[in-house]
Image (spheres, rainbow, N blue to C red):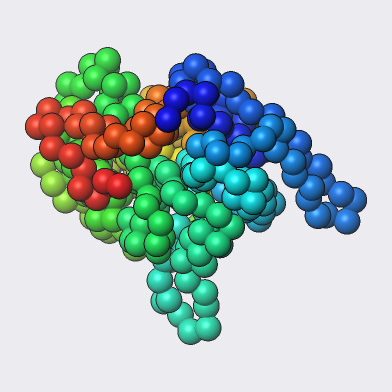
Amino acid sequence: MTADDLFIFSGTSNEPLARRICEYLAVPLRPTSIHRFSHGTLRIQLGESVRNRDVYIVQSLTRPVHRHLMQMLMMLDIARHGDARRVTAVIPYFAYGRSDKKDAPRISITAKLVAQLIETAGADRVIAMTLHSPQVHGFFDVPLDHLTSLRVLVDHFKKQDLTDTAIVSPDVGYAKPASKLAAALGLPLAIGTKIRLTDTEVEISSVLGTGASSRRAIIVDDEIATGATMMEMMNVLRSNGTTDFCLACTHGLFTGNAIEHLNAQEDIGEIVCTDTVYAPHAEEGLARLTNLSVAPVLGDAILCNHEGRSVGALFTFWEEGVPDDSAMG
């Protein structure tokens, strides 16, 4: 395949990221016409023929989730019926990642349902980043490259003074990625014991590890939604003597009163997220926000797939050079 065969289209959820990916790859973002009728349905038309092309549809499943999901499904279907050689769904943020198990009667394992919809619509392959639950990877029957933003976070934090700093994961669910970040930066690791009570309430009773009493803590998680987990983790660490905080995540959703609550925490020195989620309300209203771009990571994955090369090199950024076996596709 040549670069002329690589066609990238974008839905409306995160067109700025799609443009950055195209700029990184030096290819144009192909035009898409999306019209919403007065009764709520959509009409979508890809602006160029995709016959015999390698097509990539970039769409984050952010609010309004169902509208953006429907856009992606329609675009995948259009590309498939337009006789594209291969169709790849590029999903920087995958909604319903928390709905990965049946933990109550008469509920849906919605992450699996969404995976099946994406495949049925026409995806031959999926590229995703930092799924909330790694087991969502297994819900797809087509190949999936599960990427990580750790490479971008490592590059960012290596430029800072990390004296008396620890990496902190709020729970064991994100302990493995946090441990890789700690190893890459040469920092101690601490892990909180989080119990989720409701969508907006969590409880962290203790924190374990050699970094539990460091002066500065970089608290890292896959996403920040309401900010409840981060603020509860900060409260526990304050009692251990931590006085300076950095909050880091891949997906900065900042829902509800998150911006107001986070701005009120005077001991937060920096909040770091990536551009998997287009959140202009956070960029305008959240103080001390640093927004890093994952366009090079997604662009490299797209190029590897287009050229038939392994994506393994994308995971060998830490000192030991050991690939992240939880994320290989």
Counting labels gives: 0
Q: Which corner quadrant of the image does residue 296 belong to?
A: top left
Q: Residue at x 81, y 55 (%)?
A: 41
Q: Could you tell me residue 199's position as x and y percent?
A: 50, 61
In this rendered view, identify the residue nearer to me: 77 or 133.
Answer: 77
Q: Which corner quadrant of the image does residue 19 belong to?
A: top right
Q: Residue at x 52, y 74 (%)?
A: 108
**Residue 129, can we see it?**
yes
In this rendered view, identify the residue nearer to me: 212 or 139.
Answer: 139
In this rendered view, identify the residue nearer to me: 277 or 121.
Answer: 121
**Left or right relative to 200: residue 256:** right
Rendered view: 279 above or below 208: above
**Residue 56, can we see it?**
no
Rendered view: 249 above or below 176: above
Q: Residue at x 27, y 26 (%)?
A: 154
Q: Could you tell me residue 70's position as x and y percent?
A: 66, 54
- The quadrant of the image that shows the N terminus is top left
Q: Could you tell me residue 157's position as x and y percent?
A: 28, 23
Q: Could you tell me residue 135's position as x and y percent?
A: 33, 61
**Left or right relative to 9: residue 41:** right
Q: Residue at x 38, y 37 (%)?
A: 305
Furthest residue in direction right, as rendered: 38
